[in-house]
Image (tube, rainbow, N blue to C red):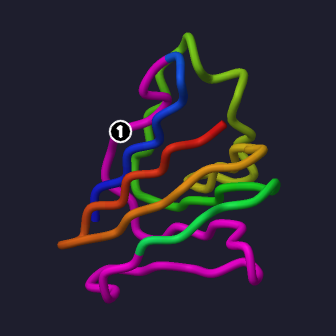
Amino acid sequence: MKLEIVSPEATLFSGEVVSVSVPGIRGEFQMLNNHAPIVSILTKGEVKFTGNNISIAEQFSSKFVNVSKDTYHLAINAGTIELNDNKIIILAN
């Protein structure tokens, strides 16, 4: 599935992923391929995503933590998420 993480300054990440976990207002939840459509508010926490051959642009690499070969975390203060047709868009602060 496709993931885009957008901040007020720039698109921090855009690429194919296998799974995404986010800090929802009622707790963390995960999305996998073919997940039902969803729109939610995000709270302070970490966006966690896993994929094959993840590539983070060099100018944004300091914002991400590489916790294992193909797993990355991004700390956010708040945001929103929309998932539809295997495309996830996260607007993060």
Magenta stretch holds residue 28: yes
Vertical comparison of 5 with 30: above or below: above
Query: How many marks on residues?
Result: 1
Q: Quadrant of the N terminus?
A: bottom left
Q: Nearer the viewer, residue 82 or 63?
A: 82
Q: Give the magenta range.
A: 10-38
Name the residue furthest left.
85
Q: Quadrant of the C terminus?
A: top right
Vertical comparison of 72 with 9: above or below: below
Graded by Cα atoms within 10 Å as few (under 14), some (14 to 19) or many (20 or more), the crowding at tag 1 reads: some
Q: Residue at x 54, y 30 (%)?
A: 7
Q: Residue at x 60, y 64 (%)?
A: 41
**Location of mark 1 (residue):** 14
How far across and down, in percent of the image, does residue 45 sit? Answer: 81, 56
Left or right: residue 5 versus residue 73 is: left
Q: Name the amino acid, label 1.
A: Ser
Name the residue furthest top.
59
